[in-house]
Image (tube, grey):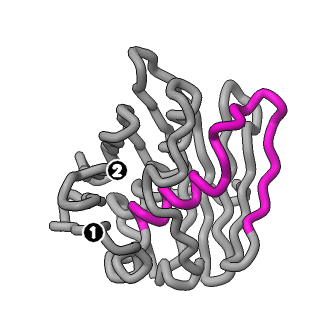
């Protein structure tokens, strides 16, 4: 099953959301619920190349990502300044990570996976995994994660290949431009 461009872009959005750690202090453990949804629960394969622009604390950072997902694995490679910053592999049971020594400690694979799943996985799967007090909603143009009725994470589909993500609690914005991955590109 082919992933639509707006939905595919969400995957990258989550991956780079964690980059806010470069510009802001690490979030508290309870900033957002940590999900561990199975790769199969995504319900479709995807392969994307993405360009990410993060704005936080008056700074802007850019990087690229390669993302692949199927029923068995979610794999992501983040590339900054032509160098692989981090690789992530989630098989539904174990989260494996390799990272460059210069990659910020506050940008963890657990957080990247969590943001990816909150914005990309089917709404029903996300809602079923949320703890009491949290709610996810999606009107087709905007997905919102809220705690006690207060929006924490808002993902807007700004175009066929563009997603704008706003993390209100941690005060950063992420813009993701996606396109299908080129054959032979691997995360």
Percent position of residue 96, x then y: 78, 62
Residue 160 seen from this side: yes
Instruction: Pick out the residue farthest to the top.
Output: 58
At horizontal 52% and vertical 24% (from top left) the residue drawn is 23
- x, y percent for residue 29: 54, 51
Marks 1 and 2, Cα distance to the nearest angstrom?
26 Å
* For residue 95, side relative to residue 117 (left or right): right
How dense is the environment of label 2, judged by Cα within 10 Å: few (below 14), some, or many (20 and up)? some
106 relative to 35, above or below: above
| Disc 2 secondary structure class | loop
Of label 1 and label 2, which has the lower sequence position?
1
> In terms of image quadrants, where is residue 122?
bottom left
Name which residue lies at 36% across and 67% down: 4
Magenta highlight on residue 108: yes
Residues in magenta, as a range: 95-120
Q: Which residue is mark 1?
A: 135
Q: Which mark is residue 151?
A: none
Pick the quarter of the image with the C terminus: bottom right
Q: Residue 111: image x %, image y %?
A: 58, 52
- Magenta span includes 168: no
Q: Secondary structure at mark 1?
A: strand
Q: Nearer the viewer, residue 44 or 152?
A: 152
Residue plotted at (71% across, 76% down): 91
**Badge number at residue 161:** 2
């Amino acid at each position: 099953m082919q992933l639509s461009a707006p939905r595919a872009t969400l995957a990258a959005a989550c991956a780079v959301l964690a980059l806010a750690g470069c510009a802001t202090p690490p979030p508290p453990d309870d900033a957002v619920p940590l999900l561990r949804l199975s790769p199969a629960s995504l319900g479709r394969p995807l392969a994307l190349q993405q360009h990410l622009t993060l704005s936080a604390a008056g700074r802007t950072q850019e990087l690229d990502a390669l993302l692949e997902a199927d029923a068995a694995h979610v794999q992501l490679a983040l590339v900054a300044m032509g160098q692989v910053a981090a690789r992530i592999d989630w098989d539904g049971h174990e989260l494996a990570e390799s990272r460059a020594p210069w990659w910020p400690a506050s940008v963890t694979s657990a957080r990247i996976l969590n943001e990816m799943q909150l914005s990309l996985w089917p709404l029903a799967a996300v809602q079923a995994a949320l703890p009491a007090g949290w709610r996810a909603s999606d009107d087709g143009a905007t997905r919102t994660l809220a705690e006690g009725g207060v929006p924490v994470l808002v993902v807007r589909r700004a175009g066929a290949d563009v997603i704008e993500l706003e993390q209100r609690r941690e005060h950063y914005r992420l813009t993701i431009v996606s396109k299908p991955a080129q054959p032979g590109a691997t995360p």
